[in-house]
Image (tube, helix red, strand yellow):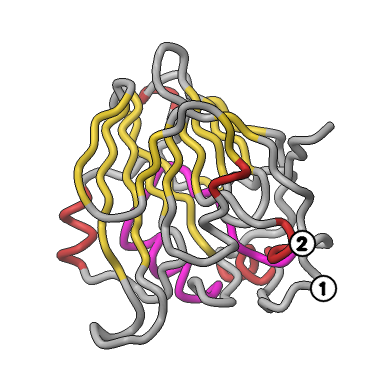
C-alpha cells in the first residue's frame, strides 16, 4: 500500500485492487495549505470542523464515514472508534479514530485526539502497524503526549501530522512545529519523503520508525 500526505491531517491511502481512502479533507482557507483536488472511493471525517470535514474537496462516487462503527468497503475493513476530550462531558468536538485494514496492514488515523488513551483502549485496537499521529497541539496531541501514545501503541511506523509548517503560519489554529516532536522522540532532522510504500507486513521495521512525509500539492 501507499500513503501520501496532503497537509494537516489529510492522507490518501491506496492499494492496488482495493478502495482508495482519503482522510480528513480540509478547507484550505482554514488551515493554510493550497486547495485540495482529490479523488477517492471512501472519505473519513474524524470530527466536524472545516479543517477536517471539507467533503467538496474530494471528487468521485464517494462513501463518507463520519463516526464510530465497523465498515467493509472495496475490500478495506474500517473500524471507527469514538474519542473525545479530556473528560466524557467535554464540550470539545467529538473525535473518531479510524483503523484501516489493507490486506492485513493496519493503519490508525488518530484524528484530533487530544488525550492519551487508556491501556484498555489501546489493547482493543489490536496491532497497529502504521500510526498517523497528531503531534503539534492546537486541538490535537502535544508533542509530549504524542510520544506517550506512541509508546503505548508500539507501531512499526509513525507518521506525524497536524503540526505547523511554513504554510500554516497565518492560520488561527496555532500549532507547534515538527521539530518539537522529533526532539521528544530523541531524533534530529528526519529527511521527508514524498510518500511511503509498504509492500507487505514482512517489509515493516521491527523497531518503531518515524517517517516524515513531505506535503504534496494536488493542483499541479
Which mark is on residue 150?
Answer: none
168 on left or right of 59: right
Residue pointed to by mark 2? 32
Does the magenta segment cover residue 34?
no
Q: Residue at x 82, y 73 (%)?
A: 170
Q: Quadrant of the C terminus?
A: top right
Q: Nearer the viewer, residue 85 or 189?
A: 85
Q: Residue at x 28, y 39 (%)?
A: 78
| First in sequence: mark 1 vs mark 2 | 2
Magenta residues (range): 142-164
Q: Residue at x 61, y 54 (%)?
A: 26
94 on left or right of 190: left
Q: Under tag 1, what secondary structure?
A: loop
Q: Nearer the viewer, residue 66 or 145?
A: 66
146 on left or right of 219: left
Residue at far top of view: 17
Q: Nearer the viewer, residue 32 or 178?
A: 32
User: Residue 59 occupies which quadrant of the picture?
Assistant: top right
Does the magenta segment cover residue 144?
yes
Q: Is residue 1 above or below residue 107?
A: above
Residue pointed to by mark 1? 170
* Residues at marks 1 and 2 touching, judged by CB atoms closer than 8 Å: yes
Amino acid at each position: 500500500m501507499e500513503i501520501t500526505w496532503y497537509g494537516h491531517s489529510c492522507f490518501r491511502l491506496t492499494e492496488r485492487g482495493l478502495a482508495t481512502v482519503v482522510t480528513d479533507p480540509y478547507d484550505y482557507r482554514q488551515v493554510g495549505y493550497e486547495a485540495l483536488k482529490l479523488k477517492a472511493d471512501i472519505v473519513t471525517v474524524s470530527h466536524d470542523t472545516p479543517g477536517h470535514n471539507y467533503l467538496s474537496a474530494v471528487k468521485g462516487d464517494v462513501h463518507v464515514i463520519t463516526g464510530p462503527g465497523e465498515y467493509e468497503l472495496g475490500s478495506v475493513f474500517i473500524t471507527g472508534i469514538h474519542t473525545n476530550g479530556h473528560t466524557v462531558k467535554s464540550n470539545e468536538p467529538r473525535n473518531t479514530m479510524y483503523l484501516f485494514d489493507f490486506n492485513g496492514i493496519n493503519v490508525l488515523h488518530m484524528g484530533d485526539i487530544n488525550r492519551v488513551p487508556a491501556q484498555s483502549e489501546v489493547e482493543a485496537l489490536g496491532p497497529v502497524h502504521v500510526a498517523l499521529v497528531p503531534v503539534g497541539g492546537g486541538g490535537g496531541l502535544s508533542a509530549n503526549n504524542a510520544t506517550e501514545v506512541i509508546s503505548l501503541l508500539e507501531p512499526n511506523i509513525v507518521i506525524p501530522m497536524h503540526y505547523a509548517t511554513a504554510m500554516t503560519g497565518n492560520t488561527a489554529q496555532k500549532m507547534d512545529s515538527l521539530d518539537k516532536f522529533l526532539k521528544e522522540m530523541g531524533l534530529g532532522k528526519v529527511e521527508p519523503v514524498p510518500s511511503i510504500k509498504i509492500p507487505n507486513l514482512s517489509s515493516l521495521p521491527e523497531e518503531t520508525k518515524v517517517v516524515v512525509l513531505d506535503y504534496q500539492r494536488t493542483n499541479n
